[in-house]
Image (cartoon, helix red, strand yellow):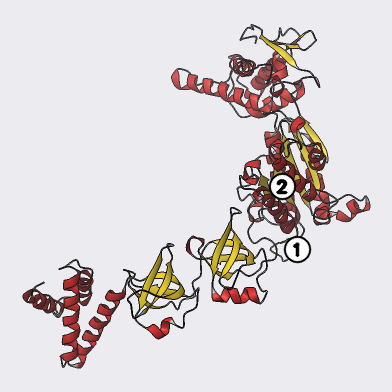
């Protein structure tokens, strides 16, 4: 930048008709090299400082000059970057000691400090600020902001290094800050303590204070309470719903009566059955009912009650990292036991002991039989130890464990005994259960028979005719199974009925009636023929999937039998 340009720039900076913020922005552009380049920016800065020092200004001008001086100084330094001091180092051919700094992005830099005596006061682990170009150590950071990754302390190696375990259970050696090392030497940091590290696990900074119990509930379900009501949504309620509800009510109102009979507060239930038989629906109904009981007894609206349900899946517990699965299981039980000890205080200040519910979905994925895999064997040992109802940590807790499985034969027998204090078997529907569930699913839907306008009577006639057809002794069957060393066995439509199948069929029938209503019949509704066709289609869809190896997943078989052949029987699609 030539002298004339410098003079023009300085004149522009001193022009009082230009707002000061605009001139400050212009200085930022110059210092950043946007106007004339980096060398020219330094020349302008030196000239400004020189003229400020040699000029005689009135009070108002001096204030503006001081403000300009401050802006120039801040621009020359900022933006600053944050790093962690490690040690001083002598660089070849340099008369000054440099500071070894680990920047927050993990980069290591050797930076000169303008204040050499100040550098000698720094300790390993102290936070410092350097200029944007990482050429100058500006000053120690005065803020108390601390952050970083968390690791687990294992042992002290020497006065500068420690061994830790990362969250992936990998060992690592870190430099250790002076403050942290002092704590370790005073035995204030024990094995297993949580250590906050610097960028990219390079430097141990400080130890987190110990916390009694868990500070965050990792496995707690914070979702909405299911809107599933027994009287409205479940046609053939299993006994387990009423049993759990009675258990919770009595434990919250008359626990002394249960202690008289030596009954424990902790209860386990296993819901066993093939897919689609209503296990998940029953658990959702129990979830809702437990909250309704808590609300009634405590006087707290349901939406204001705390989250008290843990929902566990094998995918959330099992880890590819050695030892991590065991820790997840221990963590889950720690959370359950800790939360169970926390009472609920209602708006009037009264304290109540309220239950904790644990839902273990697909227990066969977590509790498979031991002997085939050493990792699963170790996991199963931890589960059995923690799930022992006689163990002091669990036996006194008001906790309900609900587990589900489609494959009980692959679950470890000891695990089944622990989670199945009572086993509720969900099987295929009998005629009464089918009728009850079908009635719940079609409730409120439009029906049509061409003869009657009374919706209630129409549905009674449709359901009766459908039920009679499904369980008719004249049914010819839909598939023939051949057992090993046995005669062929016929399976009928009724042998494949589940709540899920009925739900799909009603949806199909409703969709067909809706299509008719938007095409040419505004008064269209579900007829007996449409509903039968939908149910028949859903049964046949299942039958078409059958092979000898999967028959047991779709229909009930005698214990111990093996299917060697599946033959589909041609059937008429309409019979009503």
Image point (71%, 7%), residue name: 476
Is residue 268 among the parts visible in the rendering?
A: yes
Position in image of residue 451 (x %, y %): 60, 14
State the image coordinates of residue 458 (x, y, percent, origin top left): 64, 20
Q: Quadrant of residue 552?
A: top right
- Classify the position of the N terminus by image quarter: bottom left
Residue occupied by mark 2: 358
- In the image shown, does 6 or 112 lie closer to the viewer? 112
The answer to which of 413 and 62 lies nearer the viewer is 413
Q: Residue 526: which quarter of the image?
A: top right
Question: What's the residue at 71%, 57% (across, down)?
Answer: 339
Q: Can residue 227 be seen in this snapshot?
A: no
| Helix, strand or loop under label 1 | strand
Distance between the Cα atoms at labels 1 and 2? Answer: 22 Å
Instruction: Answer left or right for 365 relative to 487.
Output: left
Q: Which residue is mark 1?
A: 351
Instruction: Give whichever of 50, 282 is nearer the camera.
Output: 50
The spot of residue 201 in percent (x, y) is 51, 61
Image-based side of 114 in relation to 204, left or right: left
Q: Nearer the viewer, residue 120 or 270?
A: 120
Left or right of residue 108, residue 389 in this image? right
């Amino acid at each position: 930048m030539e002298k004339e340009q410098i003079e023009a720039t300085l004149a522009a900076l001193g022009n009082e008709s230009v707002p000061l913020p605009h001139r400050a922005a212009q200085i930022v552009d110059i210092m950043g090299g946007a106007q004339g380049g980096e060398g020219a920016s330094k020349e302008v800065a030196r000239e400004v400082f020189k003229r400020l020092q040699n000029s005689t200004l009135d009070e108002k001008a001096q204030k503006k000059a001081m403000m300009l001086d401050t802006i120039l100084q801040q621009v020359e330094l900022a933006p600053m970057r944050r790093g962690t001091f490690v040690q001083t180092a002598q660089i070849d051919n340099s008369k000054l000691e440099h500071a070894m700094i680990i920047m927050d992005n993990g980069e290591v830099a050797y930076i000169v400090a303008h204040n050499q005596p100040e550098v000698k006061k720094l300790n390993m682990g102290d936070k410092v600020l350097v200029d944007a170009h990482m050429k100058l150590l500006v000053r120690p950071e005065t803020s108390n902001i601390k952050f970083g990754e968390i690791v687990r302390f294992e042992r002290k190696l020497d006065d500068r290094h420690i061994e830790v375990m990362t969250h992936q259970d990998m060992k690592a050696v870190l430099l250790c800050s002076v403050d942290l090392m002092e704590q370790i030497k005073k035995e204030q940091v024990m094995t297993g303590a949580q250590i906050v590290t610097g960028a990219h696990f390079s430097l141990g900074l400080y130890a987190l204070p110990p916390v009694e119990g868990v500070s965050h509930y990792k496995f707690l379900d914070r979702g909405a309470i299911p809107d599933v009501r027994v009287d409205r949504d479940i046609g053939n309620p299993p006994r387990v719903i009423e049993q759990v509800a009675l258990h919770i009510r009595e434990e919250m109102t008359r626990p002394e009566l249960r202690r008289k009979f030596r009954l424990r507060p902790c209860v386990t239930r296993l819901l066993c059955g093939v897919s689609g038989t209503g296990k998940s629906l029953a658990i959702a109904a129990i979830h809702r009912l437990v909250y309704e009981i808590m609300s009634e007894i405590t006087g707290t609206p349901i939406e204001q009650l705390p989250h008290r349900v843990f929902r566990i899946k094998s995918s959330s517990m099992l880890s590819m990292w050695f030892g991590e699965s065991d820790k997840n299981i221990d963590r889950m039980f720690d959370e359950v036991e800790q939360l169970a000890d926390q009472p609920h205080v209602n708006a009037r200040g009264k304290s109540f002991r309220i239950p904790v519910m644990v839902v273990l979905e697909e227990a066969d994925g977590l509790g498979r039989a031991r002997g085939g895999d050493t990792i699963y064997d170790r996991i199963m040992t931890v589960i059995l130890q923690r799930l022992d109802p006689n163990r002091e940590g669990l036996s006194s807790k008001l906790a309900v464990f609900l587990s589900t499985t489609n494959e009980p034969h692959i679950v470890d027998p000891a695990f089944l005994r622990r989670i199945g204090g009572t086993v509720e078997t969900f099987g295929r529907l009998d005629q009464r259960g089918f009728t009850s569930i079908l009635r719940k699913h079609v409730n409120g839907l439009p029906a049509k028979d061409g003869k009657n306008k009374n919706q209630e009577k129409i549905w009674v006639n449709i359901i009766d005719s459908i039920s009679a057809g499904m369980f008719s002794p004249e049914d010819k069957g839909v598939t023939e199974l051949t057992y090993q060393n046995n005669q062929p066995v016929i399976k009928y439509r009724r042998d494949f009925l589940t709540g899920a199948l009925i739900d799909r069929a009603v949806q199909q029938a409703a969709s067909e009636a809706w299509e008719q209503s938007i095409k040419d019949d505004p008064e269209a509704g579900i007829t007996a023929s449409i509903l039968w066709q939908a149910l028949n289609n859903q049964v046949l869809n299942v039958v078409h999937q059958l092979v000898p190896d999967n028959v047991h997943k779709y229909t009930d078989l005698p214990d111990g039998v093996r299917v060697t052949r599946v033959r589909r029987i041609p059937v008429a699609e309409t019979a009503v």
